[in-house]
Amino acid sequence: MKCPHCKADLPSRECPECHERIPLEGKFCCHCGVELPLLANAKPHLVSAAESAGDEIDFSKRILCSDGACIGVINEHGVCSECGKPYTGEAK
């Protein structure tokens, strides 16, 4: 799978339903929409210390994906929880 902006190779896997290449840790296929099984070594997305402790989540501090068309938020690793794109600044 290639980055649509810089054409670099991105970590990817094959969708079990439509067999297209998709981001490695995506929750849903970006081509057919099927829900994907979690990878054995994948960490759950967006589970912060506050969430796991049962504290209230402060949605005002979340950072939206800079893709502009993606519904994901930037996780603690600096990448989008849905498409895997690194955070590059404000959404377009």
Image: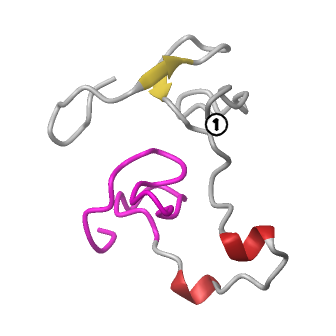
Q: Which residue is drawn at 71% across and 77% down?
A: 50
Q: Is the magenta stretch mostly helix, strand or loop?
A: loop
Residue 44's x, y, as percent? 68, 48
* Residue sticking out furthest to the right: 54
> Is residue 88 on the magenta stretch?
yes
Q: Could you say which quadrant of the image residue 16 lies in?
A: top right
Colour pattern = secondary structure
Residue 86 vs 50, above or below: the answer is above
User: Callout 1, which amino acid?
Assistant: Phe
Query: Which residue lies under the disc numbered 1?
Result: 28
Q: In this view, does 72 lie to the left or right of 38?
A: left
Q: Residue at x 48, y 26 (%)?
A: 22
Q: Is residue 5 left or right of residue 38?
A: left
* Residue sticking out furthest to the left: 6
Secondary structure under the numbered disc 1 in the rendered image:
loop
> Is residue 3 on the magenta stretch?
no
Of the 4 image quadrants, the one containing the N terminus is top left
Q: Which range of residues does the magenta coloring cover?
A: 64-92
Residue 64 vs 46, above or below: the answer is below
Q: Residue at x 81, y 74 (%)?
A: 53
Of the 4 image quadrants, the one containing the C terminus is bottom left
Residue 60's x, y, as percent? 57, 88
* Mark 1 neighbour density, 10 Å: few (under 14) some (14–19) many (20 or more): some
Residue 89's x, y, as percent? 26, 71
Q: Nearer the viewer, residue 52 or 57?
A: 52
Residue 2's x, y, as percent? 27, 27
Q: How many marks?
A: 1
Q: Nearer the viewer, residue 4 or 37?
A: 37
Q: Residue at x 69, y 29 (%)?
A: 36
Q: Could you say which quadrant of the image residue 57 lies in?
A: bottom right
